[in-house]
Amino acid sequence: MSNMRHSLLTAILLSCLIAPGALGQPEQRLKYGQLLYAEVVPGLSDSAGVGRADLLLRVSYDFMVFERGKDAVTDAPFHGGVDVSVDLRRDGVSIGSMNFGASTAANGYSETDRRDQFLLLQRTLFLEAGEYSALIVVSDRGSTRESAINKSFSIRRFDAPALGTPIILEVDSMAGMSGAYGYAGYLPFARPAALAIPSEAGREGDWYIVLERRGRTREIVFEGQVQPTEVVRRKSLRRADGVVEDFRYTDCASCVGQFTLLAVPSESADTGPYTLRVISRSGESADTMTVDTEIFWRDMPYSMRDIDFAIEAMRHILTREQLKQMNDGDESYKRQQFRRFWSERDPTPGTAFNEMMAEYFIRCDDAYYKFQTLYEANGITTDRGKVYILFGAPEDTERIFRSGEPSIEIWSYPSLGKTFRFADSRQNGNYRLMED
């Protein structure tokens, strides 16, 4: 962390600092990870009425329980895996099922609970044009953990006037259309995204996008005409029936139709549920495709994902009265007060991403585990957790051990001109801030 970033966060947080230990402990424990994303990417049918659909699964490492053993899939010491069952239905009637699975490996124990590393699986299906649903059940091989997801999709005829289902893509400034996003059809928060619209070859016309936030009161975030950034022909996901490196598109000489790429103006929109309407007008005809989606901050600090825990994690920068006021209402009210507090401290108010808020809760995530003990499960509430959250990781650390005396830990921040001393007086690992 740079000194400027360090000092900026410190200055803002210290402006509302309260005395340590003034608040009670949060009742809820922070629960991490176990992320699982599934989506089906359908294409248009060929002239015989058969189309391709790709099932994409993204399983985070911390969804799986890794084991150490000789039968690891690589030379890495830890291995894990999942088994997948898929029940496929057409118009509500079961037409078949399939089972498959995959294994992966980790080089060290610290990798086994990573929530930003994934096992990627892809299954390619060929189906007649029609309406389908898939019940996908993913089971961890190392535990009883199991998750079920329902996905609905359509295989449309290549000569049908309607548009195909839009595919949300990750935008790579270097590679353009880099691949299917693979995160259950979510729009990425505060990042550029694009839609790939499957349509018949040679389709031309004007394109319009309407992005509407769903909720008790609906809000139009964007409505207007957009220009295609690219028209891609004879491209498809790599055909695969197992583990893949990524979900990138590749050349496909036999593929019919085309993808029209549209940039989605969603970077300044907040997280939450949205309805996305895509309209294509050519002459007097117009086709519309509506998709319910979500703007999803997949890297959101976990201490933010439960509003009650997030508010309690602000114990070090709220007064008693502020905390009481922020909690004095239902969940919608709490979220409103939470957003208001942080929007007033946003260093870049013209963007959706609040760097100050993200940094604070990233530090809360770190503190929760770094400073928990057998007697204190939540490291955020400890003295070291508080200092860590307010000032970041110490620039220099020293520990002093003397026989018959409490262990001392000294944190130094030379760039800030600050030093903190902690003592483990009860010899239980919970170092308390010493008064100078």
Image (cartoon, rainbow, N blue to C red):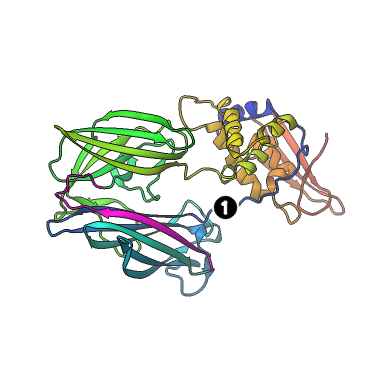
Image position, residue 60 (x, y; %): 47, 56
First to last magenta residue range: 143-164
**Dividing the image into 4 quarters, which one contains the N terminus?**
top right
Residue 175 in sight here: no
Vertical placement of 238 versus 348: above or below? below
Per the image, the residue denoted by label 1 is 32
Q: On the rendered image, what quadrant is the C terminus found in?
A: top right
The reply, left or right, for residue 209 in relation to residue 143 is: left
Compared to 53, does 315 lie above or below?
Answer: above
Q: Residue 64, image x and y in percent?
A: 50, 63
How many numbered markers are drawn?
Answer: 1
User: In the drawing, does residue 316 fall left or right of residue 280?
Assistant: right
Give the residue drawn at x 22%, y 37%: 230
**Can residue 235 be seen by looking at this rendering?**
yes
Q: Nearer the viewer, residue 181 or 163?
A: 163
Identified by mark 1, the residue type is Tyr
- Image coordinates for residue 36, horizontal then vertical, percent: 45, 56
Quadrant position of residue 99: bottom left
Viewer-proximal residue among 387 and 268 = 268
Reply yes or no: does residue 373 show up in magenta. no
Q: Position of residue 297 (x, y in %)?
A: 47, 42
